[in-house]
Amino acid sequence: METFEHKTENESETWELAHQIASKLKPGDVLTLEGDLGAGKTTFTKGIAKGLGINQVVNSPTFTIIKEYQGDIPLYHMDVYRLDDESEELGLEEYFEGDGVSVIEWPTRITEQLPEERLDIQVAYRSEHERSFILMPRGDRYIELCKELEKK
Ligand code: ADP
Ligand code: MG
């Protein structure tokens, strides 16, 4: 699988990257974020939210599993870290096929329920302020999106 790496040197560069990605997203898109605690998954999601025209404060949904935000395009922010076997009862598919962009932190718990076409992102901690975002597009649309991102 072709991967696309973007390094950020600080939090605002992560926002900038997320903002650029957000500008290319459309309703029904699905992004997953994997990476250790403190890597920057939620920070990245805040940048996505801003880019989707969401003015509400976005914070970690760890205790609620799914949070919905209204914007130019809605955001469905999920953190399935605490999820166990009940995940199917949440009706996640309806979100994935809905009118918003879904961003899922800790997707490994629900891999089987994810759509095949999606943008998987691995967030790696490099040093106190350095992070690496490794984009792994699944499906032509997301491959195209990643290539567009590299053009600028
Ligand atoms: P996660 O959701 O992966 O647990 P968070 O986004 O909640 O991580 O936390 C990331 C922390 O790392 C924040 O305190 C943020 O300020 C800090 N940070 C430092 N450098 C960066 C960077 N380049 N990108 C994102 N976050 C960074
Ligand atoms: Mg988080």
Image (cartoon, helix red, strand yellow):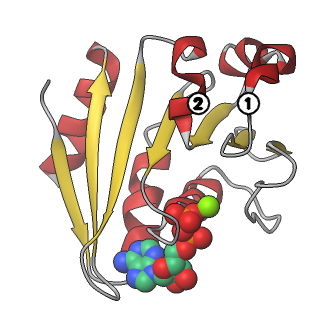
Q: Residue furthest front?
A: 85
89 horizontally vs 14: left or right: right
Q: Are dots 1 and 2 in contact, CB under 8 Å?
A: yes
Q: The residue tagged with tag 2: helix, strand or loop? A: helix
91 horizontally vs 120: left or right: right
Return the residue nearer the eye: 133 or 144.
Answer: 133
Residue at mark 1: C-beta within 8 A of ligand 2? no
Q: Which residue is mark 1?
A: 84
- Amino acid residing under circle 1: Asp
Q: CA distance from mark 1 to mark 2?
A: 7 Å
Viewer can see residue 60: yes
Where is 24 relative to 6, above or below? above
Say which quadrant the C terminus sits in. Answer: bottom left
Q: Which residue is mark 2?
A: 109
* Residue 78 position in % (x across, y down): 70, 41
Return the residue nearer the eye: 63 or 145.
Answer: 63
